[in-house]
Amino acid sequence: MPSTSSAPATGGDADVARRPLRALDAMVVAGVAAKLRAMLAQDGHVIEVPLSPWAYTDHGLHFSGRTDGEQDATLAEFSILMNQIPTGRRWGWLDKARLWDAYGWVLHSQKADDNLPEEDRMRYEQAHARLYTTAPDGGPQHTLLYETYIRTWRAYRSAKTQYEQAASREKLSNDPEALQRWQKGEGRRLAAARDEARRVWEGEGRKEEVERLQDTVRTLGNMLPSAVWKRFGDRFDPRQPDHWRRGLNEERYAPTYYWPSTALDTPWQRIRLPRNVLKKLASGERDGGLPDDVETALDPSITAVTFDYYVAKISRPWFDEPMAMFGSRAWRFTGVKRDKKLSDGSRPPQGECPGYVEQVVLARDIRVVRKAEHFSSLALDRAADTRTHLGPLEFTSARDIRRRLALPRGEHAAGACEPEPLAGTADAAGDMPGVPEKLSTERDPDCDLPVISSGESPIRFRGGFRFDRGEPCEPKDADVRWDQSDPWKWRLVRCEPAGLRYVGPADFDAIGPTDLHDWSYDTEFIPGGPSGSAENRLQSGNCFAVRTRSGHHAKVQVTASGANLVIRWVTYGPVNIAKSDPNVVFLVAADCRLLPLSPNPDHSFKWPQ
């Protein structure tokens, strides 16, 4: 992680060295990783988080339909990345070997002799024909029955995952009232959607029928390896040059996609991790394999991190059921490869291919929320120590990505019609990605601003009030003054350069800081008493808003109106929100399925001598 100091951190907030704004705090990345692991945890899987940046443009990741040079280059790199073999560790993500290498080893390994009676062979062929047919290119493809099963199963899995992830998010909030509201509201709705998706899977998807056919194909196929392996080879054989595609740099790859293909065009879920949750989540990551040279103190300026995320399934048309091959007991390595192990079956597993990427976590609209008073003091030292590069969430731009892909001139014209990045994003801040050009109290729909002052107090007869300090004061120092110079026309008057806005009867608690930032403040005064006046807009329960002399924002509610105007208020301070390029999608984690012991040949089978 870039840092201006190579001295190890001691772990406390006060010990954090000042660092460049372009890199995210190590504890932020650790906290995000822990959150994803908590949401996606399941037996036989490991969530691996990369220490190298993988970011692509939204345009480049659209692989469907007619594609241009940028999309082709992105597909090639994405395919190579998603087929690198996981290490089986939590950090570092993928190894140099690739899944198609392991596939080739097994495809050309020694197979057991066929040992299936004719009657069972017929059962196998009939079951296989119910699930697979021949595609126009000669390869296998799913039948309508199997395709419907897969579609409804994926819908159920998606609904189940949404419920579980939302439940995990609420449990981590440490707010019993929020959890209770969730259980009665969103939780009940998501549970109903999950149950309905399962009903459709069991009915329209013909779950029991298809799973009986799958079991028949799997069980009998173990005793008919010649037919099974022939189908694998017909679909993809690494030894056949025409089974590969080649990228712009002539590196070969087998096309690999994410599912659903419409993922980028659908609403994503949003995660907000406030500071206390980040620290709680990240505290366990040091024991989880976080590299030793990563500083573990959380930058004191960071108050929250938010991002949109989507968990997409990896789709390999050339190898759609890895466990059908790797889990089969009808093959083994021989000769010099006799002792080769894809996986030794331990946890974490060791071997040449301990697992494979089954899902990828995509993220976009990443926002790092910092207190402005800390943010303004951070150093922008470019001569930073880069011993560990926490790149997955480091802000980059669409322009950077296109340069990295080394696209020929004219191959990414689509970028010309993309919107300009918002202020505070990478391209808007020169060569310091993620650094806004100036401090601002910028609107973010998910981020609470820090509270400067709050409470209840009277504004005295002909007195003033300043909301930054939350105290009555002389009118010359005030944001507003309670003017009763005319005994029949009392009014609340703004004091230059402060601003004032009348809101009226409203739910005080429902007025958020983002509302305050959106409003204009051009009201000169708000008519008040005396009591019973038809023009009185400062009756108990009515609200107004104030932009203070220093530019902060306050929401105010009248609790009693008379000679003294009694109010309750909350004044919010400024934050700085550094945002990722809106055209960029990040690959922040891989959900990797771990292999059991493989190979695990069944010695009761008949093997070639």
Image: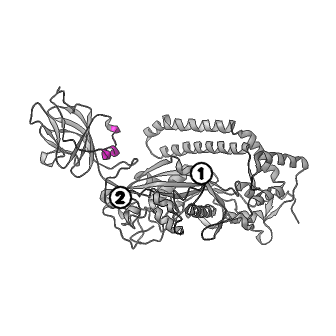
Q: Earlier in the sequence, mark 1 or mark 2?
A: 1
Residue 515 lies in the magenta stretch: yes
Amino acid type for the residue under numbered disc 2? Ser
Q: Give the range drawn in magenta.
A: 509-519
Q: How much space separates mark 1 and mark 2, taking CA atoms?
A: 38 Å
Relative side of 430 to 584, left or right: left
Left or right of 500: which side holds 450?
right
* Type of secondary structure dominating the magenta stretch: helix
Residue 356 placement: quadrant:
bottom right
Instruction: Quadrant for residue 488, please give it.
Output: top left
Secondary structure beneath dot 1 equals loop
Split into 4 quadrants, where in the image is the N terminus? bottom left
- Which residue bears the numbered disc 1? 261
- The residue beneath circle 2 is 301
Q: Can residue 123 be seen in this view?
A: yes
- Residue at position x 86%, y 62% from top? 607
